[in-house]
Amino acid sequence: MGAAKLTPWADEMRRVFKSDTVSQFVLFGNINDLVAAPDGRNPRFMPLSQYLAEVLFEPFEVVAGFDRCRGFRFHKGGEHFFGYLQAFDKFHGTSFASDGGLSGSRALESTGMLPRQPLQALELLDRFLGSVAAKQRNPKLPGAKSAAVILDHAHLLAPRGESIYMAGEAGTNLIRILNWAEDSTLTGANLATVLLTESLADLHEQVVNSPYSAKIQIKLPDREELLGFLTDLVEPEKEFAELSEVDLPNLAAKLVGMSRVASRNILRRALRNRERITVKYLSRLRKETIEKEAMGRLEFMESRRTLDDVAGHVEAKKWLRQDAQLIRQGAVNALPMGYLVTGRIGTGKTYLVQCFAGECGIPFVEMKNFREKWVGATEGNLEKIFSILKALGQVVVFVDEADQATGKRGGGEGDAGLSGRVYGMLAREMAETANRGKIIWIFATSRPDLLEVDLKRQGRLDVHIPLFPPVEEAEVGELFAAMAKKLGLEIKPGELPRLSFKEPVSGNELEGIIVRAVREHALQEGKGRALPEILKEVAGEFRPSAHTRRLELMDMLAVKECTDARFLPKRFAELSPEEVDRRISRLGGTSESEG
């Protein structure tokens, strides 16, 4: 492999190959992007296959590519392969080296000459690689003595699946690929095989887990890499200075988390249509592009609200406001790895997070349902999500209803181990200390007892914030007023009714009272009663949730999970852990989270 200055992943690949221990490489991740060529190369940015052929495999005599759609492609050395085919045809009575009167290197351009079916194509490549290895052992033999094979969309040649389903052609392809990695006569020769796939989860597990191949991730470009690409991109674009309100360093910062190709598309879209390149334009297109690349599994949370819009929860707001300040200051080592927000339904867990998003000044994303019914698809979705999160530089990730989304250590019934694999992937990612202050996790759930203990521990979700419904009359009034304001109603505090029941009441119940009153007010014909009068009547008729035991259980579970006494109201702060466990058991829960 060439010794020119290489990108980090390519340099790792070169060093592994030079060790003469591994000759098969699985490249995954951002494989469909452009790659930065070494200085002095033209073009300066090229597709991955071209980069492999012209930079990494520059000293090789033959570089062949194959995929199920286009069949064979020869980046270089096609004449050597053609010479081998002539000898092969002569010995076996085949006609690979001739097609419709074509001969020589022209025959390689014919669509009908070489097989496109993987079974026959990989067999031909296998024999060719064997001949190259033989020529290295006997230098007197003519022909190429070095070769590289690039298998694009490798997951379609060796897809993930149970071994019982790998009989026939699929199994043969898998064994052949594994043999290229394991056969000592090939690994010791000047040969290399490269498998390209976006996600390791799509590739057969025997290939992924093989100790004889190197798995190397190609990451999305960081800010500095994007800056170099954008500088080269806009150099011939005379309209850029006229249309852009954002300089190149800030432009690169705004596009972090995107591939070079996607960044180029956004920029050219504006330049070709003479559209102003503003922060708003970049934010909108970046959001759309990243959400599409994540296939809808990530959604940006854009909030105009701040923690000032949250009623009650004084200590929780104070803590989060301080952490927002640390984020803006860049004090990443002072930030938690993540938060667990607990509390009964209706206490405003999601709303609190949305308001926190309005204070931090960094991207906030919500992880949507990433589970799929197809084998390997869920793991692939998570791989894609993690790569985007890392590329964003600094981001807060919100997982709502976390007890249902995050899987179980031992797996779930009837899911073929999927739940356990999801749990394992999340646990590893959340515990990565290098991500402290860069990827901040927020889990929200009303049933933290159903969340795996390992996910809740210090070092993953450091701060557990419980939220409780108000019980004091002043607190209830404050929340009532906040719900009215949220609905755009200007109701004076004195016009809010007093509630006739003593059970704790949540924000969604108060909002329901107000909406019912607005409904009654809107249904009046002609001049009718004022809204405050109707509101008082509706409040008197309202019945709070009858599921009191279950709601109380959620309260006690939130108390049990709390990591700082400052978050607890006085009525809970004085309870001993033993009393909390007794109440949980009495209410039908388990006394230990792992239960």
Image (cartoon, rainbow, N blue to C red):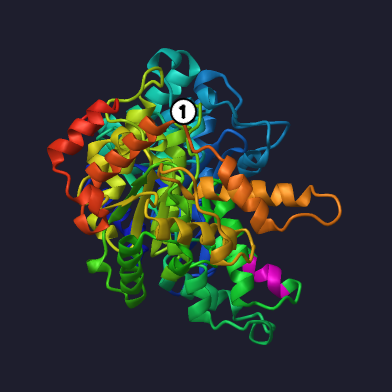
Quarter containing the N terminus: bottom left
Chief secondary structure of the magenta portion: helix
Q: Position of residue 42 (x, y in %)?
A: 53, 70
SS type, badge 1:
loop
- Nearest the viewer among 512 and 78 is 512
- Nearest the viewer among 173 and 251 is 251
The residue depicted at 66 percent of the width and 55 percent of the height is 533
Q: Which residue is mark 1?
A: 159
- Nearest the viewer among 579 and 19 is 579
Q: Is residue 316 magenta?
A: no
Question: Is residue 481 found left or right of 399 in the rendered image?
Answer: right
Query: Is 581 drawn above or below residue 455 in the view shown?
Result: above
Question: Is residue 281 found left or right of 472 in the rendered image?
Answer: right
What's drawn in magenta, residue-wise?
A: 266-271
The residue under label 1 is which amino acid type? Pro
The residue depicted at 46 percent of the width and 61 percent of the height is 478
Question: Which quadrant of the figure has residue 362?
Answer: bottom left
Q: Is residue 267 magenta?
A: yes
The residue depicted at 60 percent of the width and 78 percent of the height is 234
The answer, for residue 434, to whether it is visible in the render is: yes
Badge 1 density bin: few <14, some 14–19, many ≥20, Cα 10 Å: many
Question: Is residue 539 found left or right of 523 in the rendered image?
Answer: left
Q: Position of residue 481 (x, y in %)?
A: 53, 61
